[in-house]
Image: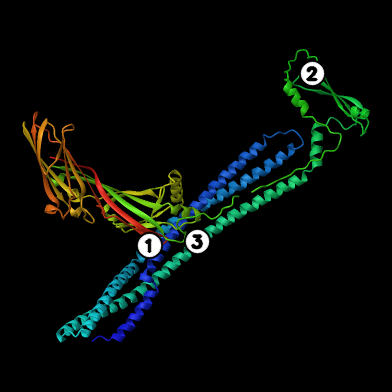
Amino acid sequence: MVDQSALRTQLAAIHTMRTLGEKNNGFDVLYHNMKHGQISSKELTDFIRERVTIEETYGRSMTKLAKSASNFSQLGTFAPLWDVFKTSTEKLAVCHLELVRKLQELIKEVQKYVDDQAKAHKKTKEEVAATLEAVQNIQSISQALQKSKENYFSKTLEQERLRKEGATQRDLDKTGLKVKKAMEAYKSFVEKYAAAKSEFEQKMAETAEKFQVIEENHIIHMKEIVQSYSCSVEETHVQIGEVQKEFVNNMENTSVENLIQKFAESKGTGKERPGKKYFHLNLPLCQCKVDWVVNSHGGSDSEEEDDRRKIHVEIKPVQPDNGTHQHRATIDELKASIGNITLSPSTAVFCIMWSFSLLGTSRGPSPVTLGSQDTLPIAVAFTESVNAYFKGADPKKCIVKITGDMTLSFPTGIIKVFTSSPSPSVLSFSLKNTSKLEQILPNQQLLHSDSSQSDTNTKDFWLNMGALTTFLRKASEQNPAASYYNVDILKYQVCSNGIQSTPLNLAVYWKCTPSTTDLRVDYHYNPESMAQPGPLCNVQVLVPVDGGVTSMQSLPSAIWNAEQSKSLWKLSDISEKTENEGSGSLRARFELSDGPSNPATLAVQFFSEGSTLSGVDMELLGTGYRLSLSKKRFATGRYMADC
């Protein structure tokens, strides 16, 4: 008899071990955390690159603004301040463009780190292969142990039941042997688990340390990059602050008195106060002389003094000089010249006011169908198209091409989660059974893949969440009533092996005479072409027959279309469970009035739900998402046969 107390002790140890990591998924978590580091590096590159674009656009806009300041009016007392604006704006533009240069250099460093990181991850994946085997081993033994445990307790309960029911000693002995055998099997798996546990703990400890070193180095390197980024931005802000300080000082130093003084120096006509005096202003653009009659006395309240303070302007023609030609000024030009001269009897006071306004707008909470903390449901669909051409009964002449599409489907509510979260969880998945694919064409705008993978049967992908969010938002705007939105993720071509890859083998035989045509189409269901054999539905065979068909006899019954000169067979589902395991023949005799017929190419169509020909599948990686539905289907594209 097996010592049951010792068995219970071992079981307690196993339970303790399992609570340390449910289903022993720690390796998977650590490995994908390492891969997420590569995603972070690429996303950081994209972030800095976007910042470069923004800074470059801003810098060039500032340069353009500085140039425009040179074109503003240079007349009036405010004119000198435009030079201050121009100089300050030019310096601000230089600050931003210098930041662009620094960040572009930083991007090169980050890109180099991304490349080195990919090589390091590839090497690490090879180094931890033994740990992955240990993980898979302990997971397999855990499942077997659980089944063995259930079997042991089942046999024990059966033994107890027979005792209570007063079964014969023979039955009790027989049951006792089963209990003993179940207990021994249980003990065997307990021991195997203990050994697997020991190896797993050792390998996992080594691997965890390796992953920790990788993560520490990754974080250190990323922080160094962020530090460089921060320093560059900070230096730019300091420079901008200095430019702004200089601008403020220049504005403060340019007093109202200085502006008036500059205007007086550039436009003044003399320092002596006149009584009544003529000032002559010769305008080169007009054939006239302007005499300014100015009475400028001190302030007085009398009408006489008010009249004397007024400026009287008289315009007298000037005789043209002999032998010279002068341009004529238009009345508008003359008005403009006069309008630019203003005098005031009292001191002018200027007030300059600056106002600033900001697998901003206020923003309130938005109702969402899905909570941002929930696992988000998505669906996947694999749709394959099989194209085939059969020549006679020779399988070597069969030509086959199979293509497929992978589509992800997102519920409407997920868009609100994506747009409300600054960084939604990265959706990543593993494509299974890729060894059966000749070519994979991912959606370049949305999908990224791990180029360092060496496993030919699996390929990991992750989505550009920013691009995905933009795509879904646009789709929602175009069709707001939809309950879900489909996204084409990738296309692929399946490796084919001639007729063995076709789900329905065909062979065609024609016998043509001047008066009749005999046709036979042999078909054979081929379950080996499918990953999971399923029925071929809605099978239809269309055969064109010329020669003036007057009547048709067929087995099974077909439909003759005299207008198109074609016969059509509609068959029920074909599978291993149908007659002759899915094999059969279509026969027809056609009576002709203008024979003989020319053997033609027939076309076949069908589809199958629930399976694909390639067996390709998807498994979500990481957390945050769950696969709520997986649909698989294949159908005929161009499926033809000749004699």
Q: Quadrant of residue 564?
A: top left
Please tell me which of labels 2 and 1 falls first in the chain.
Answer: 1
State the SS at label 3. Answer: helix
In the picture, which quadrant includes the N terminus?
bottom left
Image vertical order of residue 130 relative to residue 586, above or below: below
Residue 161: mark: none
Give the amino acid type for the residue marked by disc 1 in the picture.
Lys
- The scheme the figure's colours follow is rainbow
Check disc 2 and report the residue beneath it: 288
The one nearer the camera, 428 or 133, is 428
Q: Amino acid at mark 3?
A: His
Residue 196 image-quadrant placement: bottom left
Q: Position of residue 305 (x, y in %)?
A: 92, 29
Element on which disc 2 rests = strand
Answer above or below: position of 362 versus 337: below
Q: Which mark is residue 123?
A: 1
Distance Cα–Cα, label 2 vs label 1: 92 Å
Residue at left offset 12%, top offset 33%: 598
Q: Which residue is mark 3?
A: 221
Q: Quadrant of residue 24?
A: bottom left
Q: How many marks?
A: 3
Label located before the other in sequence (3 or 2): 3
* x, y percent for residue 511: 7, 37
**484 horizontally vs 110: left or right:** left
